[in-house]
């Protein structure tokens, strides 16, 4: 699998993870990322950064269907 075909898939998965995390935070005040990686702050920042970059990538490559 090359990077051109896997980048959209990886980005979509990371955005879904971010959406689920925000849903958990909003509904139950439970931060899954902090729970899983809270003991290693750099991993928390890395996960949040990758989710944000994935969202920007998907937004930039979004094609309006008409």
Image: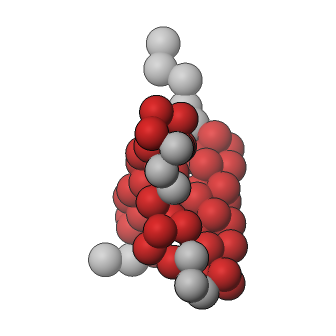
> Would residue 1 be visible to someone looking at this image?
yes
Question: Within the image, what quadrant is residue 61 found in?
Answer: top right
Residue 54 in the image: above or below residue 46: above
- Answer left or right for 45 relative to 2: right
The residue shown at (61%, 73%) is 44
Q: Residue furthest left?
A: 1
Residue 19 in the image: above or below residue 1: above
User: Who is closer to the viewer here, 49 or 34?
Assistant: 34
Q: Residue furthest front?
A: 29
- Tell me residue 4's x, y (percent): 47, 67
User: Who is closer to the viewer here, 7 or 4?
Assistant: 7
Q: Residue furthest top?
A: 66
The residue shown at (58%, 59%) is 51
- Tell me residue 37's x, y (percent): 51, 78
User: Who is closer to the viewer here, 43 or 31?
Assistant: 31
Residue 13 in the image: above or below residue 28: below
The residue shown at (46%, 33%) is 27
> Would residue 57 be visible to someone looking at this image?
no
Picture quarter with the N terminus:
bottom left
Q: In this figure, what is the number of numbered marks?
A: 0
The residue shown at (68%, 73%) is 45
- Tell me residue 43's x, y (percent): 59, 81
Residue 12 in the image: above or below residue 64: below
- Answer left or right for 65 relative to 54: left
Q: How is the image coloured?
A: secondary structure
């Amino acid at each position: 699998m090359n990077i051109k075909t896997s980048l959209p898939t990886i980005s979509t998965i990371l955005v879904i993870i971010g959406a689920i995390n925000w849903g958990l935070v909003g509904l139950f005040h439970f931060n899954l990322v902090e729970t899983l990686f809270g003991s290693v702050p750099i991993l928390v920042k890395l996960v949040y950064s990758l989710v944000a970059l994935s969202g920007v990538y998907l937004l930039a490559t979004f094609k309006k269907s008409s």
